Image: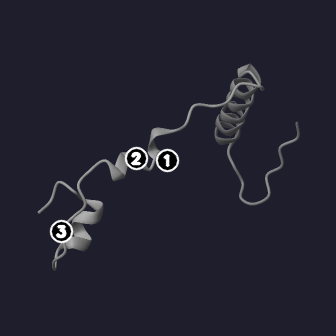
Amino acid sequence: MTIKVVRGNPTPEELAAALAVVRARAAAAAAEPSGAPRPRDSWADPSRIAARRLPQPGPTAWGRTYWPSQG
C-alpha cells in the first residue's frame, strides 16, 4: 500500500495517526467474511421514519417532518 500526501505538510504525529486509521480499517475489512451479507444499517432503514404518524398539514408541518417531538 502506498500513501501519498497531496497537499499540506503534516507533522510526523499527524501522519502516524492517519496511517494508524487506514491500517486499522484495512485490518477490519480483511477480518470480515467476504461472502456474508452485511447487516443493514438502522439509519438507512426507511421504516425508522415511516413507523411514526405523519404530521398533520398546517403552518408548522415542515418542522415536524424532521423533528417529530416538536409541536
Q: Outermost residue toward the left?
A: 71
Q: Amino acid at mark 2?
A: Ser
Secondary element under disc 3, as helix, strand or loop, is loop
- What is the count of numbered marks? 3
Q: Amino acid at mark 1?
A: Ala
Position of 30 relative to 18 (above/below): above
Residue positioned 11% across, 63% down in the render: 71
Q: What is the distance, in whole Å, between disc 3 and disc 2 at their CAs?
A: 19 Å
Q: In which quarter of the view is residue 56 placed?
A: bottom left
Q: Earlier in the sequence, mark 1 or mark 3?
A: 1
Residue 26 numbered mark, or none: none
Is residue 55 toward the left or the right of residue 15 in the image? left
Residue 56 numbered mark, or none: 3
Q: Outermost residue toward the bottom?
A: 59
Residue positioned 23% across, 55% down in the render: 53
Residue positioned 26% across, 50% down in the render: 52
- The percent position of residue 17, horizontal first and vertical second, equals 64, 35
Is residue 66 toward the left or the right of residue 11 in the image? left
Secondary element under disc 1, as helix, strand or loop, is helix
Residue positioned 45% across, 44% down in the render: 43
Q: Earlier in the sequence, mark 3 or mark 2?
A: 2
Mark 3 crowdedness (10 Å alpha carbons): few <14, some 14-19, many ≥20: few
Q: What is the distance, in whole Å, between disc 1 and disc 3 at their CAs?
A: 24 Å
Mark 1 crowdedness (10 Å alpha carbons): few <14, some 14-19, many ≥20: few
The residue identified by callout 2 is 47
Q: Amino acid at mark 3?
A: Gln
The residue identified by callout 1 is 44
- The percent position of residue 70, horizontal first and vertical second, equals 15, 59
Which residue occupies the foreground of this view, 61 or 11?
61
Q: What is the distance, in whole Å, between disc 1 and disc 2 at their CAs?
A: 9 Å
Position of 69 relative to 20 (above/below): below
The quarter of the picture where the N terminus appears is top right
